[in-house]
Image (cartoon, helix red, strand yellow):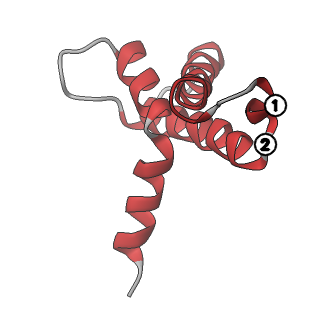
Amino acid sequence: MNFVLPQFAYFTLLGLLGGFTYILAEVAKKWSDLLTFSAFRRYIIGGITGDLYFMGYSSWDLPNSLMCWVAGYMGTHFIESLLRRMEP
């Protein structure tokens, strides 16, 4: 894998932005909801999902930046489903 920091940071930021968009669109009823623990959890997991997406790239024909944003938006469910599958 060729590691390129600007590209890695770009995908991390897009994942984080996807997590923020999810909180803004689906969860937040007021501005203070953007600063709760569950919101920060979603932001962090969105960024991690963007990293995972950067490492794995999609084989679909959709632009990687769009797919990274979608992965950040749904990142918590994605990570939690992977963890559930790994449980004995």
Of badges 1 and 2, the one in the foreground is 1
Q: Where is residue 86 in the image (x, y as percent from the top left)?
A: 39, 74
**Is 85 positioned to the left or the right of 23 in the image?**
left
Residue depicted at x 37% and y 15%:
66
In the image, is residue 43 above or below residue 7?
A: below
Q: Position of residue 14 (x, y in %)?
A: 55, 19
In the image, is residue 87 above or below residue 85?
A: below
- Identified by mark 1, the residue type is Ser
Q: Where is residue 44 in the image (x, y as percent from the top left)?
A: 67, 40
- Quadrant of image for the N terminus: top left
Could you tell me which secondary element the residue under label 1 belongs to? helix
**Residues under numbered marks 1 and 2 in contact, where contact means CB atoms less than 8 Å apart:** yes
- Which corner quadrant of the image does residue 8 belong to? top right
Residue depicted at x 60% and y 24%:
24
Q: Where is residue 73 in the image (x, y as percent from the top left)?
A: 47, 31
Q: Name the residue under label 1.
A: 32
**Is 2 positioned to the left or the right of 58 in the image?**
right
Q: Mark 2 points at which residue?
A: 36
In the displayed orientation, state which residue is furthest to the bottom.
Answer: 88
In the displayed orientation, state which residue is furthest to the front.
Answer: 29
- Please state the total of marks drawn on the protein image: 2
- Quadrant of image for the C terminus: bottom left
